[in-house]
Image: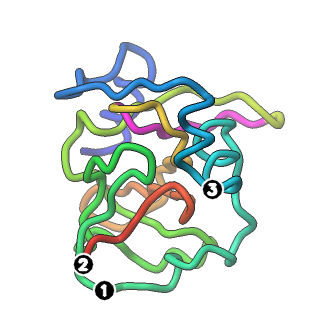
């Protein structure tokens, strides 16, 4: 996966997920902490350098906090110094949706879980080789499974 793939998905539709999880806002509120709900369901962002997963580099898989879908592998995690956990690529192209985000006067690509639509963060074309991607993900949106 590279930036051209991200733009293709953003402009022409995302890969079809293997399954879907859909719940009401009331159900999500019961299952998530207030901060997890704000970030994943209301498209919030945690302050830079505050997420507990930012500086953890243990071997494991990172799953969506909402639906437990595996999204990233620790082998693709790197220290971007951005203040958020950063990854070079998802475990599969169909677990992440790419959405054009024009909020706050910027043009970015939002990333969401394709299974449950949880807001995860954004992806940028300034990551390391070979993908050149930096998936900048909120700690509150994911869980490390050791």
The range drawn in magenta is 106-114
- Which residue is the site of mark 2? 146
Q: CA distance from mark 3 to mark 1?
A: 24 Å
Give the residue drawn at x 51%, y 27%.
Answer: 99
Mark 3 falls on what kind of element?
A: loop
Labels 2 and 1: the sequence-earlier one = 1
**Taking 41 as reference, is 10 above or below it?**
above
Labels 3 and 2: the sequence-earlier one = 3
Give the residue drawn at x 49%, y 48%.
Answer: 123
- Which residue is the site of mark 1? 58
The location of residue 89, given as percent across then percent down, is: 30, 54
Question: Residues at badges 3 and 1 in contact (C-beta under 8 Å)?
Answer: no
Please name which of the two marks, 3 or 1, marks the residue nearer to the observer: 3
Q: CA distance from mark 3 to mark 2?
A: 22 Å
Please name which of the two marks, 3 or 2, marks the residue nearer to the observer: 3
The location of residue 3, given as percent across then percent down, is: 37, 42
Residue 28 lies left or right of residue 44; in this view the side is left
Image quarter in which the N terminus is found? top left
Task: Name the image quarter holding residue 93.
Answer: top left
- Which residue is the site of mark 3? 33
Give the residue drawn at x 24%, y 78%.
Answer: 146
């Amino acid at each position: 996966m590279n930036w051209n793939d991200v733009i293709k998905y953003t402009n022409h539709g995302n890969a079809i997920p293997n399954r879907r999880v859909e719940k009401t806002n009331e159900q999500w509120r019961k299952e998530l902490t207030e901060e997890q709900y704000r970030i994943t369901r209301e498209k919030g962002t945690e302050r830079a350098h505050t997420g507990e997963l930012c500086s953890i580099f243990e071997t494991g898989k990172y799953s969506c906090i909402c639906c437990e879908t595996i999204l990233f592998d620790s082998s693709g995690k790197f220290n971007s110094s951005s203040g958020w956990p950063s990854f070079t690529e998802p475990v599969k192209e169909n677990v992440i949706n790419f959405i054009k985000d024009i909020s706050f006067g910027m043009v970015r690509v939002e990333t969401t879980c394709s299974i449950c639509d949880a807001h995860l963060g954004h992806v940028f074309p300034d990551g390391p080789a070979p993908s050149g991607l930096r998936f900048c993900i909120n700690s509150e949106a994911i869980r490390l499974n050791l």
